[in-house]
Image (cartoon, coloured by chain):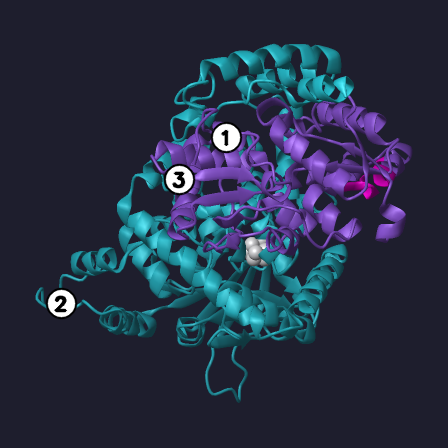
Chain colours: A cyan, B purple
Amino acid sequence: MSIHANPTTPQFKENAHKALGDPQLQEAMGKLRVGFTAARQMAMAKLPEFEALRDSARDIKNHTLAHLDLYLEAYEKKVTESGGHVHFARTAEEARKAIVDICKARGAKTVTKGKSMVSEEIALNDALQEAGVTPVETDLGEYIIQLRGEIPSHIIAPAVHLTKDQVENDFRRGHTHLPADRDLREPTQLLTEARGILREKFLAADIGITGANFLIAETGTSIIVTNEGNGDLTQILPKCHIVIASIEKITPTLEDVSQLLRVLARSATGQEMSVYTTLSTGPRRPDDVDGPEEYHVVLLDNGRSSMIGTQFQEMLRCIRCGACMNHCPVYHAVGGHAYGWVYPGPMGAVLTPSLIGVEKGGQLPNASTFCGRCESVCPMRIPLPGMMRHWREREFERHLAPAGVRYGLGAWAFFAKRPSLYRAATRVAMHVMGYYARKTGKFHALPLASGWTDWRDFPAPEGETFQAKWKRERTRK
Amino acid sequence: MNEATARGKSVGLMATCLVDLFRPTVGFAAAKLLEDAGCTVDVPSQTCCGQPAYNSGDKAHARALALQMIETFEKYDYVVTPSGSCGGTMIKHYPEMFEGDPELQRRAQRFSAKCFELVSFLTDVMKIEKVASAFPRRVTYHDSCSGLRELGVQAQPRKLLATVQGLELVEMKDSDVCCGFGGTFAVKFGEISGQIVERKTQDIIASEAPVLLAGDLGCLMNMAGRLSRKGREMEVRHVAEVLANMTDEAPPIGEPAGVAR
Ligand code: SF4
């Protein structure tokens, strides 16, 4: 069973431990940490009205979510009018079935795929393979991880966890029909090789499946942004185009989308616009020069509508730009795979428990320092740390938090609610701690705090508490 | 409020648990800075602002501790704390803790409005332009997350440090990136926290400044602990100690008494 269907999220700590000991991953993460943040910074510097754009982007999505049912209906009507078909899927299972049924009806053997996180979410490739259909990922990063049998480690840069050398090895392993002594030292050589192979697949594909960055209710149009142009070839060349998208991708008008596009690429890669912004509305009309004969949209809910009206509704504003993970110190340390499922980083820490359940995803919202950098860069102003705290509250209420944490906190609160007892107890404790460390000023190991002292020393207290010393010195005066 | 009206106001000093327990010198430094600025400082019997409970999802205890804090401190004109983290909790999070209870929420809002982080209080409310202190060292400054992003504390400490005689501020790379402390995170996810603070200390060391300052004791203990585990000799202090000219009163964080540097 693939990781999509069987998340390793409950083993987050073990995953993180492995990631921290993986030198290639650490090298790749080091590059991401510098590259993406610098690019965004430069884009911000060039657009003084960015903060105002963030406000209007947030407002557009808030408005849409408040009237989501109306916009979904309008969108469906427009798609149907333009000759396309809309399939509502409540669950991942229903979405997979809808797509497999279309493949069967058309007798499809291969499908090309543009990058789609929703396709990962529903484990579409597994379902296609089971049905005897070969999926071919056409985004370079997705193609690489498909070769490796992995899931994306980043929502916009799926193979960002890999070094160039690793990709070279994968290509040599996967493309055995090419001369073994070919030169693949330069990234452009890797790109050319992938292009050559994918070109044949594009032409042979029976169906093209893409995701969508936005769905426009006003016109029934779906929009994808890419930097490789693979999305265009995926949706134009085959006779049938299937769009798989989640319901919160709906946006009222093209005008609204153009606002969101202005914050999307800048937040993601620091570009003003992605290289390709591709719009598609229904199948080919009689006088169109190209386009598919058949056009389907599979609209996935998968728990999203039940987030509406809850503390997690704001998460549905997410436009999947990746800025939150690009700026997250925890993501930088452990990479995307440690999160154990499709959505990593801060947005994953909020979304994953919603989608796979807090029992499985509960560690993620806990694995945050609450440094707030994600919220400070999120173009949609999603209060990510606040929502991680809401998950912690739910876990606490449901007694899912680890017993050690509960007892530790309970003991602390017991003293903290009794100031004179607190003063008496801490006075003695600090005196003892200070006495033991009087020669070194620090502890190398402490009972119950090995999580701390395995990695760093624990500075010793001065010995007398501030409150005791203040009382002693100030009352004497 | 301008200096003329702010002078002579009563300030309740909220020391924070960590300062109370580990580093009283920071509390005395804060008191000195506030008194030099013309405030009357009082230290009422106090415990914890409730942040560890709040961030662990334990809302009931968080609320109880917040209420206790409000009851203790609401009588002062201002409540000042040498921490952006505890400050952030009292200023940004107390009102949201009482959502659903309009009366308590209004009370929390009134309380939050008079709470301040120490250094920004000195510059923004007391309009302090310079401090009477000398520290002829090269220092680097880490921006602790809550102070920086919840309260906008960034220019204020730099402004006052620039007036310390002989002090030279050398900026480290990514001074605004988290040190990996995160309260209970440092113990619950010790290995990840350890990796983040390792990265942080690489940037600190690369600055080549022999002194590290910050405005939050938790972050300071984390960074000092990692530096000392790596065997790096570095003087780590709370920014208030330098601003108050009190660096002779206590050894650097994590060093034994009587160590001269
Ligand atoms: S949560 Fe915000 S920053 Fe993160 S991917 Fe979504 S829109 Fe981008």
State which chain disc 3 sits on: B
Magenta stretch in the rendered image:
B108-115
Label 2, ligand 1: CB separation under 8 Å: no
Marks 2 and 3 close (CB-CB < 8 Å): no
Label 2 amino acid? Leu
- Give the quarter of the image for residue A455: top left
Q: Is residue B110 magenta?
A: yes
Q: CA distance from mark 2 to mark 3?
A: 41 Å
Q: Is residue A216 magenta?
A: no
Is residue A106 something that shows in the picture? yes
Q: Classify residue B159 by image quadrant.
A: bottom right
Mark 3 or 1: the one toward you: 1
Q: Residue sitting at 39 percent across and 22 percent down?
A: A444
Q: For the residue marked with disc 1, what is the amino acid?
A: Pro
Residue highlighted by disc 1 = B251
Is the CB atom of the residue marked by disc 3 within 8 angstroms of ligand 1's nearest atom?
no
User: Disc 2 marks which residue?
Assistant: A178
Q: In the rendered view, does A299 fall on the left or right side of B67?
A: left
